[in-house]
Image (cartoon, coloured by chain):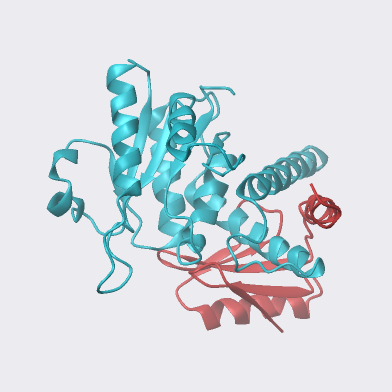
Chain colours: A red, B cyan
Amino acid sequence: MTTKTSQLSKRLINSARTDSKRIHITPRLNGWAIRKEGSLRALKVVSDQYKAIEIAQTYVENGLVSKIIVHSKNGEFRTAK
Amino acid sequence: MAFTKNLFINCPFDDDYYPLLRPLLFTAIYCDLKPQISETKDGDDIRIRQIQELIENSKFSIHDLSRIEPKSSGDLPRFNMPLELGIDLGCKRYLLKAKRCLILEAERYRYKEVISDLSGQDISCHENDPMLMIKAVRDWIYKLRTFKNKPENYTVIWDKYNEFIYDYDKDMKAENLNTDRIWEIPFTELVDHMAKWIKTNKRNITNVKKLKR
């Protein structure tokens, strides 16, 4: 393992410890799931991505989370404010 | 190598297939299997011999036939995947190995037009969708009923996969590595990273559950 990838391994192990201040919006067969990082269950599943972002934003406004990550079907993602 | 946990993966190794290969690998590791991929370790190795050894040493295998058609008009079809599937079926039959395999396709029943003799095998369709890839692999592992711990629901693995991809992208970029290029790091290394991430993540969730009790 090179120095660069050994460093990557350390970073990934650290990242895997989860950050409960992040909320993920992921596609489902029947809509979009809103889930706090680290949790195995979705808080809610809604039919529309924009609706999911709106709901996630209320968690940010209430100070429960600080970052919203919106995932796409093909494994890409973006952050939403 | 632990035969009972090894999973031989027979699929294309190119950038186009990478968005499907990653969830396939992640699901296998999440469900406690050890992916085995043919990588050139020694320039003198005869590749087919290496593939035969991997197949012989793997109880499980996944063969994705979704990319056997020519890449563009004028190209020839790709025969590596059907060839390796044939070696695996032969290994099961002639070495009398207790092997189980999953055959994947992009479209349901398309294989019947080109390899109709496969009828009766366990064939699933992923529609080139990473989430359906996770569902197909997870459901197959569940149906095997080989492991003490039943795999989580496919939505849990899909969510965890997305979490991993977020961390992987962020951490690869921090090391000036490109996440979209399939050969940026060797497969064995990607598998190691996934395994460590999953182990740490599962342990973390167990600890959180204990604290909540």
Q: Nearer the viewer, residue B95 or A47?
A: B95
Say left or right for B29 vs B136. right
Q: Farthest residue toward the front?
A: B44
The total number of labels drawn is: 0
In percent of width and height, residue A71 lies at: 58, 71
- Locate residue B32, reporting x and y percent: 58, 34
Whether residue B8 sits left or right of residue B94 in the image: it is right
Task: In the rendered view, tell whether residue A17 sits above or below residue A67.
Answer: above
Name the residue at 17% across, 46% down: B115
Left or right of residue B62: residue A8 = right
Task: Tell me residue B160's x, y (percent).
Answer: 62, 54
Q: Nearer the viewer, residue A72 or B176?
A: B176
Residue drawn at x 51%, y 22% is B4
Q: Nearer the viewer, residue B19 or B31?
A: B19
Q: Is residue B210 above or below residue A53?
A: above
Tell me the residue at 50%/55% (across/down): B21
Residue in the foreground of this view, choosing between A70 and B96: B96
Q: Residue at x 83, y 50 (%)?
A: A6
Relative vertical location of residue B125 with respect to residue B150 in this rendering, above or below:
below
Quarter occupied by residue B88:
top left
Quadrant of the image occupied by residue B107: bottom left
Give the quadrant of residue B84: top left
**Left or right placement of residue B76 versus residue A57 in this view:** left
